[in-house]
Image (cartoon, helix red, strand yellow):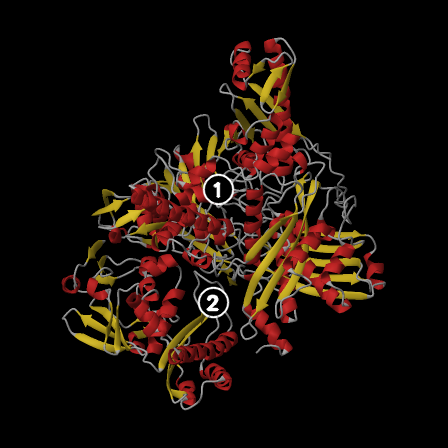
């Protein structure tokens, strides 16, 4: 249990809507985003991309482009000295020297004095291709006669995993009921509103400064140094404001970064590059597509006995984070409930399509679509209320799940109760469909990089008595930095507005994994708390040294027993003088316990876990299948809520995204080409589409997180697909098993049942 | 390029004449700007004579440069040609409706253009003027050369206005579309109807659906079957069946299958028909 | 490419520039006039991040050929407050948590500004319609809608106060 001092209580209640000062730059149009960056002498880079899904490059002629006035350099894959690289698998080059594997693959790049000239120069590059047979289907790609995309990956299988926990065979043998389903999930793009943009500056010392807004700048820095063969200290990432990320900008766009760096190194000038919206869709890194076959074994009373999953994920041409995403997709949902036996077979398969990566909850949300649909299918067969079935099986505090996750704080049962109560589960409107879904998501992964499990922060008392906080954790609207100010404010007994947060320059901020795996509020926030507490101690010690008697700090004031008062400015100046210019600084590092992960990946993987249950209410037009989502109630256990305004914003936005992917979005392909690479045809929700959303906070008090807080940013999306699938099934009488749940698919279900009017 | 903002119709025609086929008329430019601007543009969007909505006796004239936003909020159009107001309100987004014009919507010749579908149902004719000052009046259907191809040659003629008979006391019109998203979305289908009732039965019906052919398509068989029938649930169901049986449609990867599109045309035909009837009944009741 | 002289009012101040009239107003504002608040999210009128007000109407500046701007009055977010105080919309966006990444915010506020100029007391449904051409991926729109309604109320209260003060004097 966290100590609930008056300060904690007061700050969490009175400052619950605190916003960082940066927000004012955004409402006045002054915030500088990646696309806004301009540096003196800057060139503009553009990429020539493959127009074939699979081909060999026989020849590239660049002379005409090079001769064009205004063009400063042209690069092709054969100019590069780097080796294939990757986040998980080294299967990618910034520019492919001889073998292109999807429509959009990088072939050549130009730097010119303006973007129009760069664009025109691309047309002057002549590439001779020898087209190769292409494969777009994960099933066909595994056949022996299929074209091989990469050496060393026979059958085009990039990654595979098989897991058995407990005794699934006997679970299914002894089951009273076995339900099964097959689910299809397309690629989804995070569709952040700002396309990835960067300016690379080649420095006189041979290094590179990359200006770009990215969720994990330090990891990108490591990769740039590795691929460009530069000393790490010569690579610097400076961040402008980020126009949305949602997991899609954990690494930004690595090829874009590498190409702009190479162009800058070649020309000695800054090079700006940005993706067009079409490039975002065709050559970005959407989340993996998945085919899920699943079986579930139950007892007559609704007890879960076992689950089997056969998962095939579509990697596209290169791997990015797809292996990790596939892994989360395959197993995270197993820990929502007590499921004693699990059997999972997962394969990630190369195809000649857009490479894939991650989006918000790392695949947990699309697995939720399958897992939660199947639970309701079983509930229907057993005639058990889906709420009751979930309450009977859901994970509880103090338990260890089938994969070894150690659950400390857990309000899942309370979330289920609250969401259903609020939606009117037992007082249903006639003709409306109701659906429920539950989720777990790891908050603060300790297995992502076992050598860097935690986080650190540095916090200084400035001469003017204000506080500067340096962190590697990134805020692009989630409210992380406002929460950090609040956390430090609690430790230092002062107003959060006196604490400025700096995170955007790798030269001065502590190393961090950045915004991924719901780690920032939990792990990053804990480091801030520890750093601030250290500074508090130092302030107290220095004050008593200064006035020569013991002091106490209370309500932002420092005073001695004799009644003498000192303020922060005085102490700062005193220390400054004593040390000839240093500032009082607290460094905090939070190192979570090591993972107990074993060879089979059994073990605790995160500092803590967040939970959620969503309930949806929908209505279907029986004549067309058109779906109206009236309401989604989102009940969340993210521990103690530090900032209610931002936390609510995360829920509204995340649920809206979950609604979008469930009902509107998804990639469409035509012979491997993305058929809907625009915001007109890749339909993210407008204000008229988003349903009424009600956030509910079940505030458990987590023993690990700062002042009891846990992560929220990713789990907000996770239960939505399942809740909507089940609500639609309740209204239509059958499940749509293919995302997105469109009117046409609902209509087909109604027609098959003879229920269409 | 050169850009000329015309201050009068004569001026616009003069520039076209002098450019000898090299200049093109532009209005809101929302579609044209993406397709590629001409090397010489003559902007007619702010010509006062093309921006008017005028009722003359039983006819309504809507200027070609009237924006979708202006048409959607025009009391005259809302009362006398509700289908057109509904169609214009359904286009794209507020921003696009503020720029895009009715005339431009026709010249762009998209097969499921909302305004064009409503205008066809209302029986609108287009008034055009060429560089020699010759005016002609064309049926909407005659303006289409193919999918997304207009017969209107914007280098030598200008759509001035659209003219149609206003809905009289015994007449009503309605428009509906079906799209996966509620804004910023092209429709899977759109359907509009104009009906006239006499003695409680259909005396006149114009029912138009898209996308069926390059131009908004009248459902003649369904229209005919309705004449003399009473508007009731039975007729609505009949319309649903007849309308979807009457059309041959294509499916598309981005929108929906052919079967579903045909089904939707039936459902929406029934709905717009009854909505148009309700508008007549509302007038009779009040 | 022919360069033409284009004159218009930008936030009530006359500006004259030389540009290709086929260039978009968005690029004109950003690249030539240093007015960076309109953002390019798609360049095709499909996201609304570049929304500005042209003669009182919200438009996608990425779809407006520069030639069309000639003689017009263009307002961006730089021109809705006097630099000393903030517009009620800006304050409400901050107070209601309507801003996350902020990339859509300028365009969103301009659509709201155009709405409130025409309809000072909109219903929530009218607010939704008015911003339906402005995509926001972060917020789910809820807090944006609240902010616009709150700003409308504040502006109406200010108007009442102003009238009352006038009457007293």
Q: Which residue is mark 2?
A: B179
Quarter-wise, where is residue B118 in the image?
A: bottom left
Toward the front, the furthest residue is C168
Secondary structure state at the residue bearing disc 2? loop
**Is A2 rendered above or below residue B250?**
above
Residue beneath disc 1: C95
Outermost residue, bottom side: B228
Q: Which mark is residue C103?
A: none
Location of residue A24 in the rendering, given as x and y in whole percent from the top left corner: 44, 38
Q: Chain of mark 2?
A: B
Q: Nearer the viewer, residue A450 or A417?
A: A417
Give the position of the C terminus of chain C as an image quadrant.
Answer: top left
In the image, residue B204 lies at what x, y percent? 36, 86
Dot 1: within a 10 Å radius of its alpha carbon, few (fewer than 14), some, or many (20 or more) residues?
some
Which residue is rendered at x = 24% and y = 64% of the image? B51
Q: For residue A456, say whether it is visible.
A: no
Mark 1 or mark 2: which is in front? 1
Q: Position of residue A199 (x, y in %)?
A: 43, 37
Q: Is residue A699 left or right of residue A213?
A: right
Residue contact at pointers 1 and 2, CB within 8 angstroms:
no
The percent coordinates of residue A83 (x first, y second) are 55, 40
Residue nearer the viewer, B176 or B16: B176
Q: Is residue A90 above or below residue B123?
A: above
How many angstroms separate mark 1 from mark 2 (CA)?
Answer: 35 Å
């Amino acid at each position: 249990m966290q100590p609930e001092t008056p300060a904690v209580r007061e700050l969490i209640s009175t400052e619950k809507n605190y916003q960082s000062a940066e927000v004012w730059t955004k409402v006045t149009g002054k915030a500088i985003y990646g696309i806004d960056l301009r540096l003196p002498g800057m060139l503009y880079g553009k990429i020539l991309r493959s127009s074939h899904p699979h081909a060999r490059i026989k020849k590239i002629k660049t002379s005409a482009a090079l001769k064009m006035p205004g063009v400063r350099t042209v690069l092709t894959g054969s100019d590069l000295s780097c080796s294939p690289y990757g986040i998980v698998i080294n299967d990618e080059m910034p520019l492919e020297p001889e073998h292109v594997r999807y429509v959009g693959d990088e072939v050549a790049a130009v730097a010119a004095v303006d973007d129009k000239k760069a664009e025109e120069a691309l047309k002057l590059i002549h590439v001779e291709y020898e087209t190769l047979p292409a494969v777009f289907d994960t099933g066909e790609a595994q056949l022996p006669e299929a074209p091989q995309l990469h050496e060393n990956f026979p059958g085009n299988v990039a990654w595979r995993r098989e897991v058995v926990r407990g005794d699934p065979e006997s679970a299914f043998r002894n089951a009273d009921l076995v339900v099964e389903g097959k689910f299809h999930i397309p690629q989804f793009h995070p569709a952040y509103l700002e396309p990835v943009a960067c300016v690379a500056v080649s420095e006189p010392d041979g290094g590179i400064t990359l200006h770009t807004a990215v969720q994990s700048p330090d990891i990108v820095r490591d990769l740039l140094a590795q691929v460009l063969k530069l000393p790490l200290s010569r690579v610097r990432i400076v961040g402008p404001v980020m126009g949305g990320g949602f997991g899609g900008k954990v690494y930004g766009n690595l090829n874009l970064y590498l190409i702009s760096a190479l162009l800058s190194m070649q020309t000695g000038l800054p090079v700006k590059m940005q993706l067009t919206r079409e490039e975002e869709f065709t050559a970005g890194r959407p989340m993996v597509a998945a085919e899920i076959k699943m079986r579930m074994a139950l007892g007559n009373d609704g007890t879960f006995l076992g689950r089997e999953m056969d998962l095939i994920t579509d990697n596209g041409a290169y791997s990015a984070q797809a292996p990790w995403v596939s892994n989360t997709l395959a197993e995270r949902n197993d820990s929502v409930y007590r499921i004693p036996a699990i059997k999972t077979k997962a394969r990630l398969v190369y195809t000649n399509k857009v490479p894939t990566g991650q989006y918000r909850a790392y695949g947990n949300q699309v697995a939720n679509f399958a897992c939660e649909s199947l639970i309701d299918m079983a509930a229907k067969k057993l005639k058990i209320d889906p709420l009751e079935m979930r309450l009977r099986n859901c994970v509880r505090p103090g338990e260890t799940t089938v994969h070894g996750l150690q659950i400390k704080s857990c309000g899942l049962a309370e979330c289920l109760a609250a969401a259903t109560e609020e939606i009117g589960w037992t007082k249903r409107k006639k003709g409306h469909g109701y659906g429920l879904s539950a989720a777990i998501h790891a908050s603060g992964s300790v297995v992502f990089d076992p050598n860097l499990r935690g986080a650190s922060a540095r916090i200084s008392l400035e001469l003017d008595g204000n506080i500067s906080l340096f962190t590697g954790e990134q805020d692009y609207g989630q409210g992380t930095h406002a929460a950090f100010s609040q956390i430090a404010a609690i430790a230092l007994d002062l107003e959060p507005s006196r604490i400025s947060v700096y995170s955007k320059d790798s030269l001065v901020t502590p190393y961090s994994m950045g915004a991924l795996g719901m780690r920032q509020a939990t792990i990053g926030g804990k480091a801030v708390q520890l750093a601030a507490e250290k500074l508090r101690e130092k302030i107290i010690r220095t004050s008593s040294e200064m006035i020569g008697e013991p002091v106490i700090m209370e309500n932002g004031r420092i005073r001695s027993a004799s009644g003498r008062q000192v303020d922060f400015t005085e102490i700062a100046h005193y220390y400054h003088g004593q040390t000839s210019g240093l500032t009082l600084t607290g460094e905090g590092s939070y190192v979570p316990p090591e993972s107990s992960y074993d060879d089979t990946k059994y073990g605790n993987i995160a500092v803590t876990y967040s939970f959620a249950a969503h309930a949806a209410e929908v209505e279907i037009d029986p004549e067309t299948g058109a779906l109206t989502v009236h309401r989604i109630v989102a009940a969340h256990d993210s521990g103690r809520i530090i900032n209610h305004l931002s936390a609510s914003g995360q829920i509204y936005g995340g649920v809206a995204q979950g609604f979008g992917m469930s009902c509107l979005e998804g990639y469409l392909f035509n012979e491997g080409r993305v058929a809907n690479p625009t915001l007109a045809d890749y339909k993210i929700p407008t204000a008229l589409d988003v349903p009424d959303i009600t956030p509910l906070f079940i505030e458990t008090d987590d023993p690990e997180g700062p002042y009891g807080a846990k992560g929220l940013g990713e789990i907000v999306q996770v239960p939505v697909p399942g809740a909507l699938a089940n609500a639609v099934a309740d209204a239509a009488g059958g499940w749509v098993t293919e995302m997105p749940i469109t009117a046409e698919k609902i209509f087909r279900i109604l027609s098959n049942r003879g229920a269409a009017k | 390029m050169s850009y000329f903002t015309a201050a009068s119709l004569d001026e616009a025609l003069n520039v076209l004449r002098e450019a000898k086929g090299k200049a093109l008329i532009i209005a809101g430019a929302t579609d044209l700007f993406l397709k590629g601007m001409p090397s010489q543009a003559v902007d007619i969007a702010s010509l006062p004579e093309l921006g008017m909505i005028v009722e003359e006796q039983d006819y309504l004239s809507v200027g070609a440069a009237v924006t979708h936003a202006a048409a959607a909020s025009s009391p005259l159009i809302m009362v006398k040609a509700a289908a057109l107001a509904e169609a214009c309100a359904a286009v794209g987004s507020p921003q696009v409706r503020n720029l895009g014009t009715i005339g431009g919507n026709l010249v762009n010749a998209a097969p499921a253009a909302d305004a064009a579908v409503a205008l066809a149902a209302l029986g609108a004719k287009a008034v055009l003027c060429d560089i020699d000052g010759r005016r002609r009046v064309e049926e909407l259907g005659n303006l289409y050369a193919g999918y997304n191809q207009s017969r209107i040659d914007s280098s030598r003629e200008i759509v001035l206005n659209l003219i149609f008979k206003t809905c009289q006391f015994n007449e009503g019109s309605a428009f509906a579309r079906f799209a996966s998203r509620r804004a910023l979305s092209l429709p899977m289908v759109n359907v509009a109807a104009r009906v006239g009732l006499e003695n409680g039965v259909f005396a006149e019906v114009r029912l138009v659906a898209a996308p069926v052919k390059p131009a908004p398509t009248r459902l003649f068989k369904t229209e005919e079957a309705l004449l003399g029938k009473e508007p009731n649930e039975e007729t609505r169901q009949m319309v649903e069946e007849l309308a979807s049986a009457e059309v041959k449609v294509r499916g598309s990867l981005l929108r929906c299958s052919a079967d579903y599109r045909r089904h939707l045309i039936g459902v929406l035909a029934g709905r717009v028909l009854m909505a148009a009837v309700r508008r007549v009944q509302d007038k009779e009741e009040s | 490419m022919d360069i033409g002289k284009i004159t218009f009012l930008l936030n009530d101040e006359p500006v004259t520039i030389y540009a290709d009239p086929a260039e978009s107003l968005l690029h004109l504002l950003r690249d030539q006039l240093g007015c960076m608040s309109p953002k390019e999210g798609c360049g095709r009128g499909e996201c609304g991040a570049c929304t500005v007000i042209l003669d009182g109407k919200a438009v996608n500046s990425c779809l407006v050929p520069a030639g069309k701007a000639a003689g017009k009055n263009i307002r961006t977010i730089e021109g809705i407050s006097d630099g000393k105080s903030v517009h009620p919309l800006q304050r409400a966006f901050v107070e209601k948590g309507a801003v996350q990444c902020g990339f859509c915010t300028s365009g969103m506020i301009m659509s709201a500004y155009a709405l409130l100029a025409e309809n000072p007391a909109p219903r929530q449904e009218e607010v939704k319609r008015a911003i339906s051409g402005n995509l926001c991926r972060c917020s789910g729109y809820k807090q944006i809608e609240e902010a616009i309604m709150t700003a409308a109320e504040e502006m109406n209260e200010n108007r009442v106060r102003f009238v009352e003060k006038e009457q007293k004097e």
